[in-house]
Image (spheres, coloured by chain):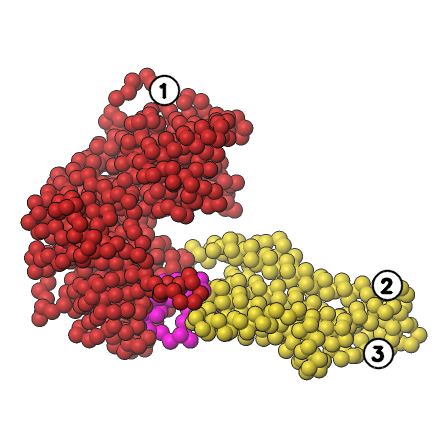
């Protein structure tokens, strides 16, 4: 692909970065080396706090007041960036390095039109005339596939969607024709279909502009899709570096292998696979182990590992790993360490008397919007949930997926009684629960509990773990008063936290631990139904696996029914028995999980599945991208709500005119699998499967 | 510092209540500004406690031979227009101010917190009614409000406390309300709601402990304002009835003789200023250190 003698755009040699704290210097990044060539994308992947962003900031010297580079070299087009004065650096960097961050709103000035702020880059850096600059900006927007660039340039940042904002930021970064583009989690804040389109764009641009890209992400699927070469970082060190295909086919560092084995994929379910979380937690940069940094968590660790720091070594041409036994790792992949429990769920437990435990009938949750007129004016409603019907079977998990704003959270909050039901009915064990929580009986409240999304706000920072788990026990008098403490400790043990967590405060816990405490609090009163609102989406993948396993175990032991919201299709595929796909307040498709992932698909499900980033470069995925953005729930499209973006509409006579006029009918593929679409089932059945994965991944054991 | 980091690392056993209190307290010693403020406050508190031992003479006894005399061996800071020892009056004045100021702040924090929590948690009509009433109070110029209240209920120590409480409450209620509005949306509040907890439990057990930090800092600053307010009332003759030693009253009386005994004004002013500055420094230090740990 490139000449071997060519000078790399970026060459990093043994980079070390430290932050000064009141406890002395903390080495955030140590001994990181890699290079990026022209038109190549180097992906850096790792969990939060592994130092991947620090590497990026070190490159452009944005380390803040207390950060500095303590060693190594950064060669940019052959010139060393370290140890130069700020002025020299600025000149050298000039406009040759551009950065794109996670949140586009922070990169855009809310008080300027998009056209003005884009043109400013050219006017300042290139001394271009305003009119010429505007013209070039317009061309650039066309190249990032921005629909209607002229009108977009007249708008302000808040007037366009998040995906479009990120497109603008990328276009701005490219205006100066940079040699190196650093992208730090640019798609993390975006929905999966939008993310897929942005990733496509990045791949196209790299070919077109000849730019070297450094792409940082925590998501292995995203990294697999955009990168040519990958570096895996752990606790401030790069532990493995290789070609993208190589790293997924032959992971040679135990951490890489661990990462791959703890993520659910589109072809794995709880009946076929066990997720294997990585035990322990990332060491604090102030207390690093003396030998291999991964040794305390490594299932393959041997005595030699803890003697001295392990250097990076080339185990095959182009494949580097920081492990003494890198060559043997793959052979040992099936040796599980003893403290991991096997919880493959065999056959589903038989459910007695067959009826659903929760029945939602044509539920509607509307929020009134204040009218802009002072007198009169029609009252408007945001139809967050509109005519949703679904059932949850006892002892099973019902998953709800959809992009942000599809109403999945509102639906769950309505079920638990935090939001008022505007119409329809909700029935729980035969009782009507259409009332808000304040009007429900104690027994009913006890039976419905919830696990929330954000681990940082799910626990009250002022009270100890023990107190917070004990509260539902005391309130619902689940156990006699003198046994509360023992019961809390039993629950803590069940969560694999142990008795010593009893007196800790939430700020002393990691994200995963907080979420476990929250789960313990939710199940303490032995509810019949637990509603989980994205309980793992804020967690790192290795922690996510542990929490998912825990929830599975709880369900096995207690027979709890769960409603599980997520936006990650791989996670719900793994975790749920039944699945509902929601779009703009309505259900598009509902049925047994395995049926959702195979044809016949609702066109929206098909698009979602083809957008999911799969952490396996050899997987084949159909390429379907949705145009436009999600319409406002204040004024949803008539007829089928998906008709404005539906790629399959053309399958109907006269371009799907019926989709605009009439609500889609429920079509029953089986008696449990419903698809709300005008396209006849026979046509939908003819679709091909979206994803085909070879059954030979390293972790499909 | 060592006490703190040790506290978090050996969290297996919860440290004793006393240790935790000291742990929280030692935070302030991390900040130079806070430490200076603390020293000033401690100095005045000690002065108040040991006033009878420290004061060279009786603050009320008059010496007709020494009227508006400057500093001398007998009267360290001189005497006032009635021949009373200024130093002794200052020392005893500490007692008045250090009782009345915190007391009035405590009262306004209590009332303000209850109103703010209620308005913030329930929102809607309750919020509108409570906050508009408090806005009405805030619309009056502070001095005017003091004048009206004291004129209506008469000058006395208790009435000074009532007046300051009345004036201080709206500000605290606003602060607590805005904090409550934020905390109300946290997941742990939702969790409490899904447990069917009583609104009073949610307000006072789940929310209140989490507004504590900013509230304490605000209250400390308000003690400073209250000292000013007591001084102002004293100066206007609406404070404590004479002959009680009162810093504000001392300024007011000495003002009349500013040309003959200029230093007599200075001493009580210095006392008021140092105490208020001390409180402000302490509050600043506390804010700096607590936000750092969050």
Would you say B276 lies left or right of B116 here? right
| Residue in front for this viewpoint, B205 or B65 | B205
Say which chain is yellow: B
Q: Is residue A321 magenta?
A: no
Q: Write down the residue under mark 3.
A: B61
Q: Is residue A337 above or below residue A476?
A: above
Say which chain is red: A
Q: Is residue B241 visible?
A: yes
Q: Which residues are magenta?
A: B181-208
Separation of disc 3 and disc 2 at Cα?
A: 22 Å
Q: Write down the residue under mark 1.
A: A7
Identify the subunit bearing mark 3.
Answer: B
Tell me which numbered mark, 3 or 2, is placed earlier along the sequence.
3
Would you say B278 lies left or right of A63 here? right
List x then y, in percent, for residue B134: 56, 72
Q: Write down the residue under mark 2.
A: B262
Query: Which quadrant, please, contains the C terminus of chain A?
Result: top left
């Amino acid at each position: 692909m490139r000449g071997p003698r060519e000078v790399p755009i970026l060459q990093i040699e043994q980079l070390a970065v430290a932050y000064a704290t009141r406890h002395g210097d903390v080495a955030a990044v140590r001994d990181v080396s890699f290079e990026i060539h022209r038109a190549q994308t180097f992906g850096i992947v790792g969990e939060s706090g592994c130092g991947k962003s620090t590497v990026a900031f070190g490159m452009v010297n944005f380390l803040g007041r207390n950060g500095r580079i303590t060693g190594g070299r950064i060669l940019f087009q052959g010139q060393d960036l370290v140890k130069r004065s700020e002025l020299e650096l600025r000149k050298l960097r000039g406009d040759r390095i551009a950065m794109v961050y996670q949140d586009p709103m922070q990169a855009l000035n809310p008080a300027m039109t998009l056209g003005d702020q884009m043109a400013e880059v050219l006017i300042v850096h290139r001394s271009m005339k305003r009119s010429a600059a505007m013209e070039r900006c317009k061309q650039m927007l066309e190249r990032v596939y921005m629909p209607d660039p002229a009108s977009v340039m007249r708008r302000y940042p808040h007037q366009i969607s998040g995906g479009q904002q990120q497109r603008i930021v990328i276009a701005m970064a490219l205006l100066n024709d940079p040699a190196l583009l650093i992208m730090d989690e640019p798609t993390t804040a975006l929905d999966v279909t939008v993310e897929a389109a942005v990733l496509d764009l990045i791949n196209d641009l790299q070919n077109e502009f000849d730019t070297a890209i450094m792409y940082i992400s925590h998501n292995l699927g995203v990294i697999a899709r955009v990168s040519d070469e990958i570096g895996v970082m752990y606790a401030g060190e790069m532990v493995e570096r290789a070609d993208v295909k190589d790293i997924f086919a032959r992971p040679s560092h135990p951490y890489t292998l661990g990462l791959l084995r703890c993520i659910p994929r589109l072809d794995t379910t709880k009946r076929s696979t066990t997720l294997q979380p990585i035990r322990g937690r990332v060491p604090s940069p102030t207390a690093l182990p003396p030998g291999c940094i991964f040794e305390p968590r490594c299932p393959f660790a041997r005595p030699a590992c803890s003697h001295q720091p392990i250097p990076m070594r080339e185990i095959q041409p182009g494949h580097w790993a920081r492990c003494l036994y890198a060559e043997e790792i793959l052979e040992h992949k099936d040796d599980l360490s003893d403290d991991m429990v096997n919880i493959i769920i065999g056959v589903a437990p038989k459910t007695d008397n067959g009826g659903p435990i929760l029945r939602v009938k044509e539920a509607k949750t509307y929020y009134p919007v204040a009218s802009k007129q002072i007198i009169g004016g029609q009252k408007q409603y945001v139809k967050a949930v509109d005519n949703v019907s679904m059932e949850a079977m006892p002892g099973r998990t019902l998953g709800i997926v959809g992009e942000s704003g599809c109403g999945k959270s509102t639906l769950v909050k309505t079920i638990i009684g935090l939001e008022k039901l505007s119409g329809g009915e909700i029935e729980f064990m035969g009782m009507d629960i259409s009332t808000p929580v304040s009007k429900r009986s104690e027994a009913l409240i006890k039976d419905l509990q919830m696990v929330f999304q954000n681990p940082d706000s799910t626990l009250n920072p002022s009270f100890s773990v023990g107190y917070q788990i004990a509260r539902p026990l005391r309130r619902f008098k689940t156990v006699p008063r003198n046994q509360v403490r023992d019961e809390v400790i039993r629950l803590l043990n069940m969560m694999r936290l142990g008795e010593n967590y009893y007196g800790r405060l939430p700020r002393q816990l990691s994200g995963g631990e907080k979420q476990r405490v929250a789960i313990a609090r939710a199940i303490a009163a032995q509810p019949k139904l637990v509603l989980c609102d994205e309980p793992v989406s804020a967690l790192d993948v290795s922690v996510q696996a542990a929490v998912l396993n825990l929830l599975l175990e709880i369900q096995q032991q207690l027979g709890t029914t769960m409603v599980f919201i997520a936006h990650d299709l791989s996670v719900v595929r793994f975790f749920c028995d039944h699945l509902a796909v929601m779009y703009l307040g309505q259900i598009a498709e509902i049925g047994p999980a395995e049926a959702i992932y195979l044809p016949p698909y609702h066109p929206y499900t098909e698009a979602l599945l083809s957008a999911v980033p799969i952490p396996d470069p050899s997987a084949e995925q159909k390429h379907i991208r949705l145009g436009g953005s999600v319409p406002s729930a204040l004024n949803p499209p008539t007829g089928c709500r998906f008709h404005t973006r539906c790629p399959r509409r053309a399958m109907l006579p006269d371009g799907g005119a019926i989709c605009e006029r009439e609500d889609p009918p429920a079509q029953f593929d089986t008696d449990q699998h419903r698809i709300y679409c005008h396209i006849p089932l026979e046509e939908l059945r003819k679709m091909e499967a979206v994803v085909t994965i070879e059954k030979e991944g390293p972790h499909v054991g | 510092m060592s006490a703190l980091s040790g506290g978090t690392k050996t969290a297996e056993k919860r440290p004793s209540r006393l240790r935790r209190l000291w742990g929280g307290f030692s935070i302030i010693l991390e900040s130079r500004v806070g430490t200076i403020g603390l020293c000033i406050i401690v100095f005045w508190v000690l002065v108040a406690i040991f006033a009878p031992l420290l004061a060279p003479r009786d603050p009320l006894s008059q010496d007709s031979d020494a009227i508006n005399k400057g500093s001398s061996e007998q009267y360290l800071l001189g005497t006032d227009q009635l021949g009373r020892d200024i130093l002794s009056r200052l020392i005893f004045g500490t007692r008045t101010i250090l009782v009345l100021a915190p007391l009035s702040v405590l009262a306004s924090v209590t009332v303000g917190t209850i109103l703010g929590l209620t308005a913030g948690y329930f929102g809607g009509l309750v919020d509108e009614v409570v906050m508009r009433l408090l806005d009405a109070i805030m619309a009056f110029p502070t001095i005017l409000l003091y004048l009206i209240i004291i004129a209506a209920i008469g000058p006395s120590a208790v009435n000074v406390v009532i007046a300051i409480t009345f004036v201080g409450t709206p500000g605290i209620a606003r602060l607590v309300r805005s904090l409550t509005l934020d905390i109300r949306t946290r997941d742990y509040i939702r969790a409490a709601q899904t447990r069917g907890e009583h609104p009073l439990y949610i307000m006072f057990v789940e929310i209140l402990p989490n507004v504590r930090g900013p509230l304490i800092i605000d209250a400390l600053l308000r003690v400073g304002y209250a000292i000013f307010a007591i001084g102002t009332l004293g100066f206007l003759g609406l404070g404590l009835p004479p002959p009680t030693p009162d810093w504000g009253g001392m300024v007011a009386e000495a003002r009349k003789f500013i040309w003959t005994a200029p230093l007599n004004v200075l001493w009580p002013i210095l006392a008021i200023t140092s105490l208020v500055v001390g409180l402000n420094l302490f509050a600043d230090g506390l804010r700096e250190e607590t936000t750092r740990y969050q």
